[in-house]
Image (spheres, rainbow, N blue to C red):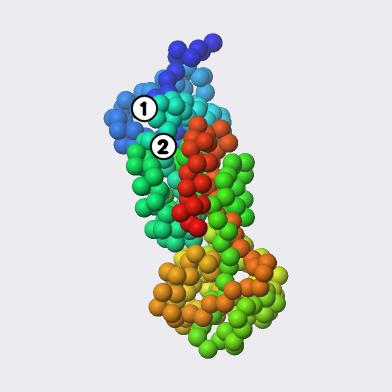
Amino acid sequence: MPSLNDLSLRQLQYVVAVADTLGFHKAAARCHVSQPTLSAQVQQLEGVLGVRLFERDRRHVLVTTAGADMVARARRILIEAEDLLSAATQLREPFSGTLRIGIIPTIAPYLLPDVMPKVRAKYPKLSLVFREEKTADIVRELGDGLVDAGLVALEADLGACSHAEIAKDAFVAALPKGHPLARKKRLTLSDLQGENVLLLDEGHCLRDQTLALCAQAKATETPFRATSLTTLAQMVSSGAGITLLPSMAVPVENRRGQLETRPFVKPAPDRTIALVWRPRSPFASTFVELARTLRTAAG
């Protein structure tokens, strides 16, 4: 019967690295060890567990069915170990060290330039490292311990994340110059009926939300798929259709005044910007305070 003395956190790190990269050479490079050392440690762990974790030959590495379960358990153990160290750091000196935060691309370029100078001024010992990702990737990386928190829209599927709201971000209609709807000061969703609407590509949570609004308005989605709000704004200015933009994006995407933008009558459709984190994160109190600072800075 194997005991805790027969395995190490380092071995678990090696196993997770192999599962992530599907290659012993790549995993060794990621872990900064030689391939023979990593391979020997993985084999030793397989011997202790009595389970074959990987199928491997000269060209391919596959995670076995039993290995997938062991890798998932290894990830959870490593996350708990990191959280233990992080909790100790937080107890010694809150708002110090590094926090990794995923942020969706429909928020990052519009929120960060405004709020980060104020955050850095308030927390000079805290380093925030941002990774721009789609919502589903942020949720997955939270679960895997690759990021500590996320800046996302609450309307997306976030699983069991804890959260603190930052701001409400109303949608506006973005129209090409001379569009008939520009004659109105405010629009209703029904005004969009029959309009050709440009949307983001699959995987963006903003696409899902605006697609639902288009269905409600009986608008028509165009075949075009944009990878960014910048592309959407450029396509609208060319007359290819209209779109919905978050209010926070308008000062950037319409800085040349090439678009007509119109708000919706209240209650206007909107999204809720929030900071999210794992429910058992040792940084929970830090994130609540950080969200409060972000809310003040964004306002």
Residue in the image at 45% along x and 14% along y: 6
Q: Is residue 143 above or below residue 271?
A: above
Q: Nearer the viewer, mark 1 or mark 2?
A: 2
Can residue 232 be seen here? The reply is: yes
Q: Is residue 41 above or below residue 177?
A: above
Q: Between residues 79 and 29, which one lies in front from this camera angle?
A: 79
Q: Between residues 160 and 165, which one lies in front from this camera angle?
A: 165
Can residue 54 be seen here? The reply is: no
Residue in the image at 39% along x and 45% along y: 122
Q: Between residues 6 and 211, which one lies in front from this camera angle?
A: 211
Residue 15 in percent (x, y) is at 44, 30
Which of the 4 image quadrants contains residue 1? Answer: top right
Residue type for callout 2: Phe
Residue at the spot of label 2: 95
Q: Is residue 224 above or below residue 13?
A: below
Residue at the spot of label 1: 39
Q: Between residues 275 and 79, which one lies in front from this camera angle?
A: 275
Residue 195 in percent (x, y) is at 63, 80
189 on left or right of 249? right
Alpha carbon distance from label 1 to label 2: 39 Å
Q: Which mark is residue 241?
A: none
Q: Secondary structure at mark 1?
A: helix
Residue 146 in percent (x, y) is at 45, 40
